[in-house]
Image: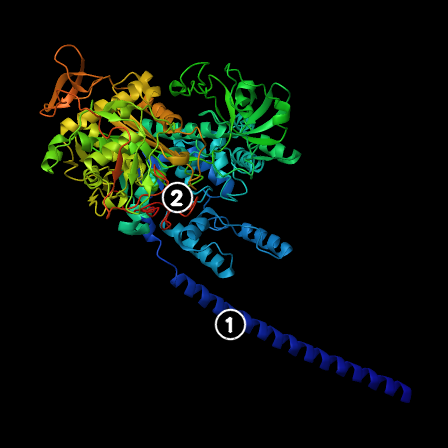
Amino acid sequence: MIHAQVEAEGQGGMRRDQNRGTREEGRFWRITGQVVLLVVVVGGLGVGSWLTYLWQTLPSVAELKHWKPATPLRIYAANGQLLSVDGPRLRDTLQSQQIPEQLRNAFVSAENGHFWSNNPLYYPVSFPGILRAAWIDLIHFAPVQGASTIPEQVARNFYLSPKKTITRKVREILLAYKLARHFSHRDILDLYLNKIYLGNGAYGVGAAAQIYYGKPVDELTLPQMAMLAGLPAAPEYFNPLANPKDARSRRNYVIGRMLAHGYITAQQAREAEAAPLSAQYHNEGRNIARYATQWIERWLVSQYGADMTYRSGLQVYTTIVPRLQTAANESVAIGLENYSMGLDSLDPKHYRGPVGHLDKAQIEQALNGVRPKLLPPQDPANLRWGLVLSADHAHAQVSLEGQETVTLGQRAVAWTAGTPGSNGEQHPVDMGRLLKRGDVVWLRHYVDPGWPANGEDWRTAVWKTPAPGAAGWQLTQIPKVQGALVGMDNATGAIVSLAGGFSYSLSHFDRALYAYRQPGSSFKPFVYAAALDGPELLAHGKSNYLTPVSLIADTPLKIKLPNGTYYKPTNYEKTFSNTPIPLWKDLADSINVPSVRILMHVGIPYAIDYAKQFGFKKSQLPPVPSLVLGAADVTPLQMTRAYAVFSNGGFLVKPYLITKVVKADGDTLPLKNCALCVTQPPAKPAITPGVAYLMTRMLQRVIQDGTGIAAKPLGHFLAGKTGTTNDEKNAWFVGYGRHYIASTWVGFDNNQPMGHWAAGAREALPIWIHYMKTALADEGSYPFFRPQDITQASINPKTGTLESDGGETFDFLSGFLPPASAPEIPLFGPGTSIEMPANATTPSASGNGNGGNSFLQQFGNSPLHNPPGNNGNGANGGQNGGNGPLF
C-alpha cells in the first residue's frame, strides 16, 4: 500500500507539474500574442501614418490634364525646311488622335498586358507582378526585376527619380492609384507614350519614330512599332543601332505578346518576325547646316539662357538654302579628301592605311549591323565605312556598313600608287597587299580626279563627280587638312550656306567665321581698286590714279625699310618677265612685284584707309609693303563680305543668318546684340559703282584667261581671284556671279605648309567650282550691270594709251581715261629702289603672306554650350568659338 500511495502521490505531482507547465506555456503565448498584436497594431498604425503622410505629400496630378512638355528649339531653312531640332530631350509630342491604335497595342503588350483591365489585382498596380519581382530580387540579393505597370511608369517619369528605394516604390504605387482616379486608361497611355525614354535622345514615340525610322508614327509598320515597344525595358541594351541581335529578339517577343493578346493574327506575326531590322540613325541627317545652327544656338543661349533656348519652343528662321548648303558640305568634303588622296596636285600623298582591324567575332558583329567601336559615332561628311571581306590582286570585296557588298577595282584605289605618269596612265595596285580581310576602311562615291592629259594645262583640270552610284565606290581617308566655304547673296548679305570644316562631328570649330588666316593674292583687288578710284584719290589730294591698262614694270624691286634692311618681293614662279605688264593682266595672272609697285604708288596709309571701306578693321591691316600680297589676317566670312562690294555695285552689306525668332505663342523676339541677324538698313555705300564694275571686269579676266581659268567652262559671267600664301600654308578662291558669291579656304589648323605645288587654283578653286555648279544651276547667264559712270575707249595694248583708230576697247571711269601718250618709263621702272618713311612699320622678313605661328588650338568636340575661348593666330587672333565679333 505504501508503494501504491507513493506511486499515486508521484503521479499527482507529475500532473501538477504538467498543469503548471501548461499554464506557464499558455501565459507565454498570451503574452507573445499580445506583443505581436501590439506590434501589428503599432506597426499598422505606423505604416498607416506613413502611408497617410506619403499620400498627403503626393503632388497634384490634375495639372497633367494641361501638361505641355518642354518643347525643343527648332531652326528652319529659308524655304521652311526643318534644319534642326535641338534640346536636352528630343521630343515630338503627339495628340491622342495622332497615335495609331496598333502602336498602343504594341506597348500595352510589351509593358502591361492587363492595362485595359479594371481588376484591382492588376490595375493600376499589378500585385502578382510585385510579388514576382520581390522573389527574384530576393534570390539575387539585388533589385534586378521591375514590376511597374504603365500608370506606375507615368508616375515615376513625371514625378519621381529612377533610383530604386522602398519609399520611391511606395510613392510610385500611391501615385498610380491617384492617376487612375483622375485619368482614363487612354489618357494615361497617351501621357506614357509621349514621355517614355526610348534611347538615342528620343523621348516619346513621335521622336523615336523620327530617330530610328525617319518618319512619323502613322507611317510605321507593325515590326517597327514592335521594335519601339520593346525599348522601354532597356533602351540601351535593346538599341537596334548598337545591338541589333538583342533588339531583334526583343522585337519578336513583343510580336508574340501581341499575338497572345489577340491584337494581330498568326500570319501577321510570322511576317513581322521575318522582317529585317530597318532602324537607322536619322536625326543628324536633318541638320545639314550644323556649323550655322551652332552659332545660332550659342547666340540664343547668350541672350536668353539655355532653359528658354532649348525648352520653350523657340522657332528660328534662317537664310540657309538647303540645296546650296548640301553643295557646300559636299564640295568642301570632296576637295579636302582629294588633297589627302593626292588627286588635287602634283604632290603625291600617301594612304595611311585602314582605320583599324576587326577579329573574327567582331567581323560577325559588323556584318549584323553593329558599328565597330573604333569608328566615330557618326560617319563624317560624305564618307561611309566599309569592312573588307576579301582581296586579291585586282579586286576587293567590301561590306558597306554591314548592309551590302560592293566590289572595288583598280580605279577605286589607283590614287594610293601616287600621281600618274607623263602618259596619264596609273600604276597598278596589288589589292591583296593593300587590303586584308577585317580591315575597316572609309569609302565615298567615286570621284574622277580629272588629271590633265599629256601636254594639257594643269590649270584647266578639275575633278568631276559622276551621279552617286553610277561609277561605284572609291577608297578614301579622313583628311588632316581643313577648309571652309561661305555662300552669300550678293545684294542682301543673306548667308545661304556655311561650311566651317570637313565634318562637324569631328571638329566643332567654325573656320568660316573664326579662322583668321592670311589671304595671299586674293587681297590684291582691294589695293587695285584704291589705285583705280580716281575721284577718291583726287578727294585726298592725289592725282596718281591708274587705269586697267596702266603698264606696270615686272622687274626686280627692293624697298628700304626704316631699320635699314631691304624688302625684296618675288613672284610666285621666282622669276621676272622684265617687261611692262598691263594692270588688268597683273591681277589676272597674280603677278606679285607689279602689285607691290601699285601699293607703293598709292601709298600704304591710303591703301589701308581704302581697304577699311570693305569692312576690314585697321588692326587687321599691317602698314607694310607685303599688305597687297596678303599680310593681313582675315576670315572667309570677311572676304565674302568684302568681295560682295565689287559684285553688288559698291555697297557694303551686313551678312546675316537669322531673319526672325518666334516664341511658342507666336510672338517675335527682338534681335538684340546679334552679329548675324537681319538689320535695317542692310547695306551702306562703300565705293562708287564705276570702280566696282571695273574691278569686276578685271576679275572676270582672272577666270577667262588667268589663274582661275578652270572655272571658265561653267559658262556664266563670273569673276573671282585666287590666293596662295608663302610656303603654301593657305589657299583661297573668292568669286561671284550675278546673284551668289562664295569664298573658299583650305589649310592646316596648325598652319603647316601644304606642299610645294599647293595653290589657290589647285586646292580652293575646285571646291568653289563644284559649289557654283549648283548655285548657277537655276540661273540664266546675264552680264554684270554697267553703271552710268563708265566710259569705253580704244587703247593701244602695247603702250596703254588712247588709240583713235582701231585698238582694243576697254572700260574706264568717266573722266579718268588713259593718257594720250605713254610715259618714257613704266610705273616704277627697272631697277627702282623705294625708301619707306622712317616712322613706318618694319614688315615681316618673310614678306608675302606669311601666316602666324599658331593658327588655332583645334578644340574638336568641345561641349556646344560651353564655347572655348580664343582660338586663332596672326595679328588679331581668333574670336571665341561662340558669339564673338565677326567683322
Q: Is residue 142 above or below residue 191?
A: below
Q: What residue is shown with label 1?
A: 42
Q: Is residue 194 above or below residue 443?
A: below
Q: Is residue 333 left or right of residue 430?
A: left
Q: Is residue 691 left or right of residue 846?
A: left
Sort mark 1 into few (<14), some (14-19) or many (20+) by Cα contacts within 10 Å: few
Q: Nearer the viewer, residue 79 or 673?
A: 673
Mark 2 or 1, closer to the camera: 2
Q: Is residue 290 left or right of residue 378?
A: left
The x and y percentages for residue 796 are 19, 16
The x and y percentages for residue 145 are 57, 50
Q: Residue at x 44, y 28 (%)?
A: 757
Tell me the quarter of the picture where residue 201 sits: top left
Amino acid under label 1? Answer: Val
Instruction: Using the rendered image of the protein, determine whether residue 760 is visible from the camera's viewpoint.
Output: yes
Q: What residue is shown with label 2?
A: 855
- Furthest-top residue in this view: 806
The x and y percentages for residue 746 are 39, 33
The x and y percentages for residue 8 are 84, 84
Gap between marks 2 and 1 measured at Cα: 75 Å
